[in-house]
Image: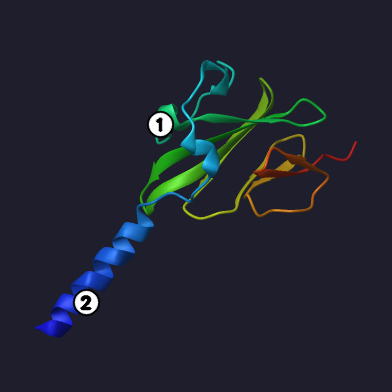
Amino acid sequence: MFGAVAALLVVAVLAGCSSSPPGLAIFDREQQASDLPPSFVDLPDTIYEATVRYIGEDSIGTKYFASESNDPQGRAACMTVVASDDDWSTGCATSLPVEVTISSGLVATLDPDTVGGDEQVGRYVSVELPTL
């Protein structure tokens, strides 16, 4: 009996961990109108629109947004990278980091512990700029 209870407790703890998104302090503040990406960006249906937060812009004008989504494995952290109306992408993962590459060759990594790349955007994104 004790073994069965302990096994259920372990399953419950693991299930609780898998349903929580990776913690990013940016989600601790309320969403503002300026947090939403441009209207041409069609976010996946799995993203909770109320969680979208603007992270910042890099030196070449690319904008970065964080959000949370529902994933079959649990809640996920997402990043949307927007260079232009025809060069943007969204990526999600149930654990950090989240890496997104857009067609221009720019690679962005969402992770508060990420260092490196050509630039840092806010406290959360490391950017490798495309080679020209």
Left or right of 5, for residue 71:
right
From the top left corner, tell me how far across and down residue 104 is, in percent.
77, 34
Residue shown at 25% from the left, 64% from the top: 12
Could you say which quadrant of the image residue 87 lies in? top right
Q: Toward the viewer: 82 or 2? A: 2
User: Mark 2 highlights which residue?
Assistant: 7
From the top left corner, tell me how far across and down residue 55 is, in percent.
63, 33
* Colour mapping: rainbow
Could you say which quadrant of the image residue 5 lies in? bottom left
Question: Please, is residue 54 above or below residue 71 in the view?
Answer: above
Q: Toward the viewer: 48 or 86? A: 48
Q: Toward the viewer: 4 or 93? A: 4
From the top left corner, tell me how far across and down residue 41 is, in percent.
56, 22
Circle number at residue 94: none
Residue shown at 45% from the left, 32% from the top: 51
Kind of residue at badge 2: Ala
Q: Toward the viewer: 46 or 121? A: 121
Split into 4 quadrants, where in the image is the N terminus?
bottom left
Which of the marked residues, 1 or 2, is nearer the chain's N terminus?
A: 2
User: Mark 1 highlights which residue?
Assistant: 45
